[in-house]
C-alpha cells in the first residue's frame, strides 16, 4: 500500500484584498505537507465576500479549492446580538472554528492549519476545544508519519528553543510560525474551484465577536511591512509619536511600539511588537527609545536589519542591532526626516 492520502485545510486571512503574508507562508508549508505523500491538493478557507476572494493568487500557491464563508453567515438575524451593520465583516473565533470543524469533516481533512497570528492561534485553539483534538502552535516543520501521526518542530519560549514533537490524532491541528517559513509560490498555478459555503452557526457561537470596517483594514499591516519604525518609553508620551509617524510615512513603513507604550495607553495594542504582540519580519526595523526586553526581541528578531536609537549605551537592544545611534531620538528623528525630505 502507498502512503495514506493527506487532505490539508488551511485558514487564509486577508490583508485588504490580498492574502496576508503570514497565510501565504502557511499555505507554503501546507503544500509541502501534502506533497510529502504525493498529493498536491491544498484547500483554503476564507471568510470574505466571494467577489473579493483572490482566487488567482491562491491558485499560484497550489490551492485547488477555496471555501468562502460570506459575512452574512456570521450575522445574527435577531436576538440579543442584533445585526452586524452592512459593510462590516464579523470576526467570531468560536464561529470560525465551528465552520472549520464542519469543513474538516465534509472534506475528510487529515490536517487543519492556520498562520500563527493572533487570529490563527485563537481560532485553532477553539477548534481543538470543539473537536477534542490536540493543537500545536507556532510550528516550523510538519511531516506526516503514516496514519494518525505527525512529526513536527515548533517554537517554544518565544522562538528561543525548537521542540521536536510527535502528534497522534486523526486530524492534526497546528499553526505555522509567522517568521519561520518563506512564502514560496508553487512551480505552476493549479486550476482552482471557488465554493460559497453556507455554514450554519448557532447564536451561542456569535456571543463573542469583533467587527471592523473595511476602511480600517486597508494599507500595510505591521506583520507584512517592509519597514517598521518602533517607539518605546523613550518617546515620552502619545504626542511624541508624530515624528515617528512622519518618518514611517517617508520610508513607506508603519509604526510599531513596545509593550509599555500600550500599557500606558499611548497607542493601541494592534501596534505592539513582541511576544504578546505581533512578530515582524521587515527589511528594516528602526527601534527608537526601546530598551529591548526579551519579550520585545522575540517579536523583532526576524527583522533583516535593526537600527537602534537610544540614549543608554547599555540598553539590551544594542546587542541585537546592526547599527546604533547613541543619542536623543527627539533630535535624531527630526534630523532623519529633514535629510529624507531634502533628498
Image (tube, rainbow, N blue to C red):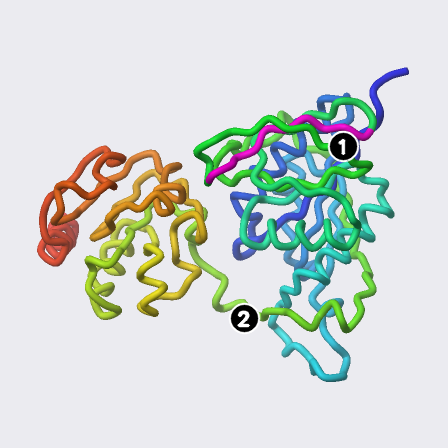
- Identify the residue under disc 1: 168
Principal secondary structure, stretch drawn in magenta: strand
Q: Which quadrant holds residue 322?
A: top left
Q: Position of residue 306 (x, y in %)?
A: 27, 38
* Front one among 339 and 303: 303
**Residue 317 appears left or right of 111:** left
Pick the quarter of the image with the N terminus.
top right
- Identify the residue under disc 2: 213
Q: Which quadrant holds residue 93?
A: bottom right
The image shows residue 180, relative to residue 329, as above or below, that is above
* Front one among 292 and 20: 292
Residue positioned 33% across, 56% down in the render: 257
User: Callout 2: 10 Å neighbours few (<14), some, many (20+)?
Assistant: few
Magenta residue span:
148-157
Residue positioned 16% across, 48% down in the render: 310
User: Callout 1: 10 Å neighbours few (<14), some, many (20+)?
Assistant: some
| Magenta stretch contains residue 155 | yes
Q: Which numbered dot is residue 80?
A: none
| Magenta stretch contains residue 87 | no
Residue positioned 65% across, 70% down in the render: 208
The image shows residue 324, relative to residue 161, as above or below, that is below
Q: Which quadrant holds residue 238?
A: bottom left
**Residue 269 appears left or right of 76:** left
- Label 1, secondary structure: give it: strand
Amino acid at each position: 500500500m502507498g502512503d495514506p492520502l493527506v487532505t490539508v485545510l488551511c485558514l487564509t486571512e486577508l490583508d485588504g484584498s490580498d492574502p496576508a503574508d503570514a497565510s501565504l507562508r502557511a499555505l507554503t508549508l501546507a503544500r509541502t505537507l501534502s506533497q510529502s505523500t504525493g498529493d498536491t491538493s491544498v484547500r483554503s478557507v476564507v471568510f470574505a465576500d466571494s467577489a473579493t476572494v483572490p482566487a488567482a493568487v491562491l491558485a499560484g500557491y497550489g490551492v485547488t479549492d477555496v471555501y468562502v464563508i460570506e459575512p452574512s453567515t456570521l450575522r445574527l438575524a435577531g436576538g440579543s446580538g442584533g445585526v452586524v451593520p452592512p459593510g462590516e465583516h464579523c470576526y467570531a473565533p468560536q464561529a470560525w472554528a465551528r465552520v472549520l470543524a464542519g469543513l474538516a469533516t465534509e472534506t475528510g481533512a487529515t490536517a487543519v492549519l492556520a498562520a500563527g497570528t493572533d487570529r490563527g492561534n485563537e481560532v485553532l485553539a477553539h477548534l481543538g476545544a470543539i473537536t477534542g483534538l490536540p493543537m500545536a502552535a507556532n510550528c516550523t516543520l510538519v511531516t506526516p508519519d503514516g496514519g494518525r501521526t505527525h512529526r513536527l518542530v515548533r517554537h517554544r519560549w518565544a522562538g528561543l528553543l525548537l521542540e521536536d514533537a510527535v502528534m497522534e490524532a486523526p486530524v492534526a491541528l497546528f499553526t505555522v510560525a509567522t517568521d519561520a517559513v518563506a512564502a514560496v509560490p508553487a512551480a505552476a498555478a493549479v486550476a482552482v474551484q471557488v465554493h460559497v459555503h453556507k455554514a450554519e452557526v448557532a447564536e451561542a457561537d456569535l456571543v463573542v465577536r469583533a467587527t471592523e470596517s473595511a476602511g480600517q483594514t486597508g494599507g500595510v499591516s505591521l506583520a507584512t511591512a517592509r519597514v517598521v519604525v518602533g517607539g518605546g518609553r523613550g518617546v515620552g508620551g502619545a504626542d511624541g509619536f508624530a515624528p515617528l509617524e512622519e518618518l514611517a510615512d517617508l520610508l513607506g513603513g508603519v509604526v510599531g511600539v513596545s509593550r509599555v507604550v500600550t500599557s500606558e495607553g499611548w497607542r493601541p495594542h494592534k501596534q505592539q511588537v513582541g511576544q504578546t504582540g505581533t512578530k515582524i519580519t521587515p527589511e528594516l526595523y528602526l527601534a527608537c527609545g526601546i530598551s529591548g526586553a526579551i519579550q520585545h526581541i522575540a517579536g523583532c528578531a526576524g527583522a533583516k536589519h535593526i537600527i537602534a536609537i537610544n540614549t543608554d549605551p547599555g540598553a539590551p537592544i544594542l546587542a541585537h542591532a546592526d547599527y546604533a545611534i547613541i543619542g536623543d531620538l527627539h533630535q535624531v528623528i527630526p534630523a532623519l526626516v529633514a535629510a529624507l525630505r531634502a533628498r
